[in-house]
Image (cartoon, rainbow, N blue to C red):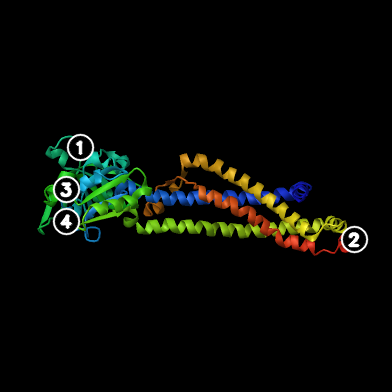
Amino acid sequence: MILKIAWRNLWRNKRRSIIIQSSVVVGVAAIILLDSLSNGMLVQMLNNQINTSVAHIQIHKNGFKDNKLVKNFIGEPEKVKSVIDRTSHVKAYSERVISFGLISSASNSSGVYINGIDPDQESKVSIMSAFIKKGNYITSKGNDDKMLREIVIGEKLADKLNVDIGDKVVLLSNTPDGSIGSDLFRVSGIFKTFSSEIDNSLVYIPLKSAQRLLEIGDNIHEIALILDDYKFADNVRDDIRKNLSDDYEVLSYSDNLPLLVIQLDFYKQSAYIITVIVSIALIFGIINTMLMAVMERIREFGVLKSIGMKNSKLFFMILTEAFILGVSGTIIGALLAILIYLPLSHTGIDFSIFAASLESFGVGAIIYPVLLLENVINTLLTIPLVAALGAIYPAYRAIKLEPVYALRYV
């Protein structure tokens, strides 16, 4: 009975009900879309790092992460690869030679992070080849000297060195015995990624070229793994650790990107804070509107109390009205947010005007929102309750009315 009366009461004053409902719709849609945008940006930052250089898991000689010396190469790499082949969820792996060095052109020089890669292996682990803006990625065909001298650099680095496709650069780096290794390379490709740091500091050369430059024979510094699902990263890391000695360090992306993982965890907590802030604003809006409704219906409440309606039923009738508005507004708001989200999840939102700032955070100019089920459920459960809480004070004012005064109220 209370539910039926509350439903009818809502539509006696359609304008008032629509105003309350609209505020709920806008609040819900704003919360869901903001959550999806923030989540999309952080997930994009994580995926960009994983799909370019970090991968899901990295294997090095123990201590290499903190001290990237040229002589800290992996011992018995074949043994490590046999362990990887026996480990479940591993999709692909790539052998890498990694070192710091100096790149010089006729115009300038710069410190760089040298990556020696096998293009066939690396294409299964990273997406760097997709960022080539000019020229070509490192080729894997043949072993002649011309192909071994290919180098791929970032756009910002190319501008700094004042070089273009086909120009020559010299790469220098320390060798294990302390001498300086140097070699001449020809720029075969220029890439532009989501990160200004990568574009300014990373260079890619063939694996054999890196081994020759550093004079390390067939040794490698890193094996990067990509899994069929990132959620298994920590489990796979632990499985590999059990099958390798302490001479090796096995690190998941959460070990290599601790600050970014903390940011993701922090976002999940901040999402609740944002919901609370919007909910507080919504409560005051509902209190204000419901108080106006109570003042307009003083005579009605007087009649109901005079014919015997108990205060508890009157109280819950007003709460039910607010709850119905909250539920209906939440459902409509969620549907509206999803309708807006679906096309944006495919096309993305272009923030080119903030491209320079986003690149410094490792995010591209186009952000693709990511909507999580837990965010939607959290909103669907919270907002109707908030609407009901906002009606508590107006309902309290209603039950405090004296029937005689209420019936004579004009």
Mark 2 or 3, which is nearer the eye?
2
Query: Viewed as shown, does residue 210 lie left or right of 391?
Result: left
Q: Is residue 285 visible?
A: no
Q: Are marks 3 and 4 in contact (CB under 8 Å)?
A: no
Amino acid marked by disc 2: Arg
Amino acid marked by disc 1: Ser
From the top left corner, tell me how far across and down residue 314 is, in percent. Answer: 78, 57
Q: Which secondary structure, mark 1?
A: loop
C-alpha gap between disc 2 and disc 3 = 94 Å
> To which residue does mark 4 refer?
70
Who comes first in sequence, dot 1 or dot 4? Answer: 4
Mark 3 or 4, which is nearer the eye?
4
C-alpha gap between disc 4 and disc 2 = 92 Å
> To which residue does mark 1 refer?
140
Locate the C terminus and report the quarter of the image it occupies: bottom right
Between 329 and 248, the residue placed more toward the observer is: 248
> To which residue does mark 3 refer?
210
Q: Residues within 10 Å of mark 4 (few under 14, many from 20)?
A: many
Q: Are marks 1 and 2 in contact (CB under 8 Å)?
A: no
Q: Quadrant of residue 144?
A: top left
Query: Viewed as shown, does residue 384 lie left or right of 366?
Result: right
Amino acid marked by disc 3: Ala
Amino acid marked by disc 4: Val
Q: Are marks 1 and 4 in contact (CB under 8 Å)?
A: no
Q: Which secondary structure, mark 4?
A: loop
> To which residue does mark 2 refer?
408
C-alpha gap between disc 3 and disc 4 = 11 Å
Who comes first in sequence, dot 3 or dot 4? Answer: 4
Between 384 and 234, the residue placed more toward the observer is: 234
